[in-house]
Amino acid sequence: MMQSSTSIDTEDTYPIDDDQTASEAVLDAIAEEAGVDVLDLAVPLYDAVDPDALDAFYRTAAGADGAGPSSVSFSYYGYEVEVSGDGELVLRS
């Protein structure tokens, strides 16, 4: 049986503010972690995930009552990104 292991050096959590979309929150968090301005990110978010679909997921998951926690994960800019319906964004590197 083959096992794979992933080493996570850091895990940082960011809130998704009420006045921003999930895709904006991802870009802000990645830019902060990378120490660059959002406009200076070298890789567009749409290369990793459809920003409109991410925002629609978040709006739907955040408004779901009693459905339990929902999240979506993807890789972007050297980070594993997890966006959850409870308003939390986690970056793992």
Image (cartoon, helix red, strand yellow):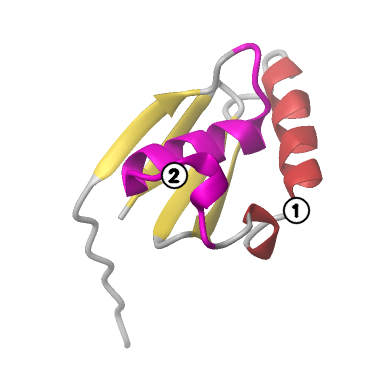
| Residue behind mark 2 | 30
Looking at the rendering, the stretch of residues picked out in magenta corresponds to 18-42
Disc 2 element: helix
Of discs 2 and 1, which sits in the foreground?
2
Specify the amino acid type for callout 1. Answer: Asp
The tag on residue 13 is none
Residue sitting at the far bottom: 1
Q: Identify the residue shown where x is 55% and y is 56%.
A: 74
Quarter of the image with the C terminus in it = bottom left
Q: How crowded is mark 2: few (under 14 residues within 10 Å), some or many (20 or more)?
A: many
* x and y, in percent, of residue 18 in the image: 62, 11
Tell me if 68 is positioned left or right of 75 in this view.
Answer: right
Point out residue 7 in the picture as x, y percentages from the top left corner.
Answer: 22, 64
Is 35 within the magenta?
yes
> What's the distance in space between the residues labelled 2 and 1, CA to CA?
16 Å
Q: In this view, does 81 lie above or below 46?
A: above
Label 1 SS = loop
Q: Is residue 1 above or below residue 70?
A: below
Disc 1 designates what residue?
50
Question: In the visual, does 42 lie left or right of 4?
Answer: right
Return the residue nearer the eye: 41 or 84: 41
From the viewer's side, name the closer residue of 58 and 19. 19
Q: Where is residue 32 in the image (x, y as percent from the top left)?
A: 37, 37
| Direction from residue 14 to residue 39 in the image, left or right | right
Q: Dividing the picture into quarters, in which one does residue 33 lie?
A: top left
Q: For the stretch drawn in magenta, what is the main secondary structure? A: helix
**Residue at 47% across / 33% down in the picture?**
89
Q: What residue type is labelled 2?
A: Ile
The single residue placed furthest to the left in the displayed view is 9
Q: Which residue is drawn at 26% across and 71% down?
A: 5
